[in-house]
Image: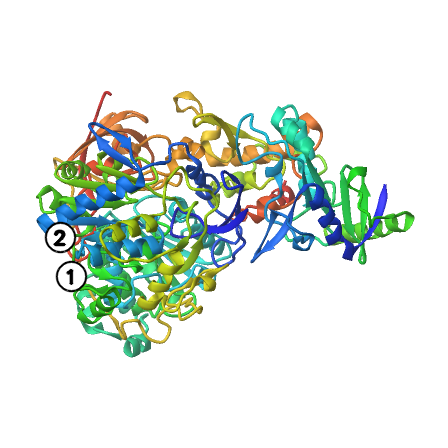
Amino acid sequence: MEVKTVCPYCGVGCNIIVVSDGNKILNIIPSKYDAINYGTICIKGWKGLSFAESNKRLKKPLLKKGDGFIEITWEEAIKIAVKRLKEIFEKYGPDSIGFQSSAKCTNEDNYLMQKLARQVFKTNNVDHCARSCHASTIEGLISTIGSGAMTTSIRDIDNSELYFIIGSNTTEQHPIIGARIINNVLIGKKLILADPRKIQISNFATIHMRQYPGTDLALLNTMANVIVEKGLYDKKFIEERTENFEEYLKVIDFYDVDRGSRITGVEPELIEKAAIMYAKSRSIIFYAMGITQHTQGTENVQAIANLAMLTGNIGKKGTGIAPLRGHNNVQGASDMGALADFLPGYKRVYDDEGRKIFEKAWNTQLPSKPGAALNEMFDLARKGKIKGLYIMGENPVISEPESDLIIESFKNLEFLIVQDIFLTETAIYADLVLPSLSFAEKLGTFTNTERRIQMVRPFLSPPGEAKADWEIITMIAREMGYDWRYSSPEDIMNEISSLVPQYSGLTYSCIEYNGVQWPVNGCKGTEIMHTQNFTRGKGKFIPSYWKRPDEYTDKEYPFILTTGRLYYQFHTGTLTRKSNILEREAPEPFAEINPDDAKTMGIRDGDCIKITSKYGSVNIRARLTDMVPKGILFAPFHYFESPINRITNPKTDPVAKIPELKVTAVRIERCYP
Amino acid sequence: MIYKLKKEFLQEYIDDLIKNYEVWGPKKIGNDVIFSKLEKGSEFTDERTILGPKNFIYPPREKIGEIDDKEVIVIGVKSCDLLGYRMLDDVLGIDPSYAERRKRVHFLNFVCTEPCQYGFCTTFSGPRLMEYEMQFTDIGNYYVIECNNKNLIGKRFEEGGENEIKALEIIMSDFYKKMPPLDVKDLDKKISWNDPKYAEFAKRCISCGACNFACPTCFCFDTYDDNGLYREWDSCILSGFTRMAGNINPRPILDLRLRQRFMHKLKFHYENFSYYLCTGCGRCIETCPVRIDIRDFIRGV
């Protein structure tokens, strides 16, 4: 059997064809589909799918007994889950239960998860990991242009003249997009890179600005200042399509090149040159966690939108804003309203009109107060406000900041359900573990970073008794007394396409072979958004002044720690660390440190160092490299052996509630394990 | 023996094969052509697939010692791939599971009559092979079939002769004109240990390993334990390929790993076996996300 499906790793959503005999993968073939990966995939596509065949997969529901688990039947599991959730619901009220949905699950799974929270348990306490990656994109782009997604297409990269990458290690995290950019630069197009680290794509940068972590907003404002100063802004575009330009001018006026240079540490000439090049070319801005994971994340994103509107680099071929989504379906999970403050289709929970649509469809009253965000759920659990937690396909113990407190919060819960494909670092704390299906065994859709809704198809038979997430959620809702009648993911998609405007009229037959990009109308997609009007009508300049990151260096904590991912590992390693080759390539945690810093401290390559922040410490191996500038440490967060998120900064952006994972003040010392 | 088969009877021939064997061949699925188990002859297309059918004799991942014993016919393999498997034989032939599969899998190859975008097979053996089980060439209304396996002769096959051989030769000389061979004389001696191209390629290589996984001649594997011993295709582009205990790595940077790939294909293997470990299939170019082009490299040597 051969099926065309979508790679389950990053947001690029490469199309692959998997040949299998139902029990094992016989071959993996990159699809020639020219909209995305034109016959290429990265190492994670080639080698990372074997997790599905791993012998460590969960095969039966597990119930905590003493320190261990015992296997139970599905019937028992659903009975126990519902009994306990109901008890908590009745005893403490609706907001005492939290639901965590997953960007690794399909749109259908996510839609049902938030429906379970809202319709059945009457709470908006439903969220997923977009909170820690692109929550600020959603807020930042909705407030400026009206839609929190990539405005252009992967294919459109070829139409552009210049690429401005800020806060994205593109070749490692979105390799196929990175490669497409490189191919274009090789034929003479230009690349501006703003990144403190000397990442691979810097080999191709016409200009590389190495700003201090947490100064992106100042850099973007300074570029805008230069563009206005030199008269390179698009007056016609601003007049016809935007508002609030005067306010914007007032703010960016403050950021003359010298000031910008002092704040960011980038030479004034470089900023000037970059700004002029950006303004004069048909340009796309790519950004990722380096922009969003800050206490000013939303403002950073707004600054990007401002810059694009200032130069008219949006809504046309070869231009736009491209937030690069980390997970395969973080776009889709957000679209489906697996967010504490949004209903499906980005209707605010407090927007009466939007809420009415769903109240009518679901035949119930819906709560209008925004729920607890992902990280807030743990705080509330610690404070005893949240008593039950239902986590689907997330591993917060590794992925969220100050993780010791998360483990502590689990002890306060009366009931914790973890629904996953492996017994993760989080699942071991669960009272009930429900075995679910991976992308390899279920049908559904993922929405990639360019808004393309694509079919995911099963090619392996389920391990043991594991069930699809949508099936499990449906069983729970039914046991709760709700008459949910979904017999297949297609039923769910039909409901989605009748309620979510972006997915309006979409059916599985539209995306039988190739996906379409939302907003869809029937089977017709949209390659480039905002061509005539912005989704919010007029584009709005929302200027902000740069503020110092929440943490900065001082005598006690003289280094800045910034975190990220590696090419060979993905997120908390739940999947990649089951792949022999991927795990071999990046088997252990490390912290990158500049050789000059290391020398002053007497640290050699491979030495054990203890990194300490306000929140705790972690022992980790030092890796000496000039990829990081002096004063900065970089560490990947994949590893439970040195869970770097134990010590990262949990302070959040006040609007988007995204933690500032990219800037934590730390000190280091040698350790002797 | 030389046969010919009217083109309209190819489907019927495949249908007959399906009655007796498990038959796999290229099938169109949307934009893609992939080797698929054929249910009927009409599904077959002779278009080029993005990967060759190497997985039939050498699976990407397998439990060591596990071989099924069914006989399989793979029809529509391109000559460049099949030639690659002949080269694999010299290295993997002593491996029992490889040898067993090699016996049970019959490759019926199709000779290209038009050059493909990335191929440069004329540099090596060209599209018409000297060793084959059954080789098909499209000469217009007929396929010329060169056959070394009597068991697979179809009922519609007609005996061929001088005329068919002549037609083949004309098509081949035409093919060579359209795809002029690259100069590979003494390549093994001329290739440089310090070619600046290695560093140039390394700047953009994203270490995906596609050049290895798509290559019909790459044979390296890694083994590991997951409740049983498994082996899977490995890639010399990856640092873990040569990393030893204590984090010592003889090829610590990508430049050196890319050098190994080119040197192995164009020098080391030649020194051991007197042929280049490359068939000119161009699959490494096609599947490379950043278009690292072995033809450029050869031309530059």
Q: How is the image coloured?
A: rainbow
Q: Residue at x 64, y 27 (%)?
A: B91
> Is residue A46 positioned above or below A584 on the image?
below
Question: In the rendered structure, which amino acid carries the disc numbered 2?
Answer: Asp
Residue A500: percent from the left, percent from the top? 31, 66
Badge 1 element: loop
* Residue A265 visible somewhere in the drawing: no
Mark 1 — residue?
A367
Q: Is residue A658 left or right of residue A447?
A: left
Foreground residue, B155 or A42? B155
Badge 2 element: helix
Q: Quadrant of the N terminus of chain B?
A: top right
Q: Quadrant of the C terminus of chain B?
A: top right
Q: Are marks 2 and 1 on the same chain?
A: yes
Query: Quadrant of residue A644 in the image?
Result: top left
Q: Are marks 2 and 1 in contact (CB under 8 Å)?
A: yes
Q: Which mark is residue A261?
A: none
Question: In the rendered structure, which amino acid carries the disc numbered 1?
Answer: Pro
Other-residue count near label 2 (Cα within 10 Å), few / some / many at <14 / 14–19 / ≥20: many
Other-residue count near label 1 (Cα within 10 Å), few / some / many at <14 / 14–19 / ≥20: some
Residue A573: percent from the left, percent from the top? 34, 37
Residue B167: percent from the left, percent from the top? 85, 52
Q: Which mark is residue A95?
A: 2
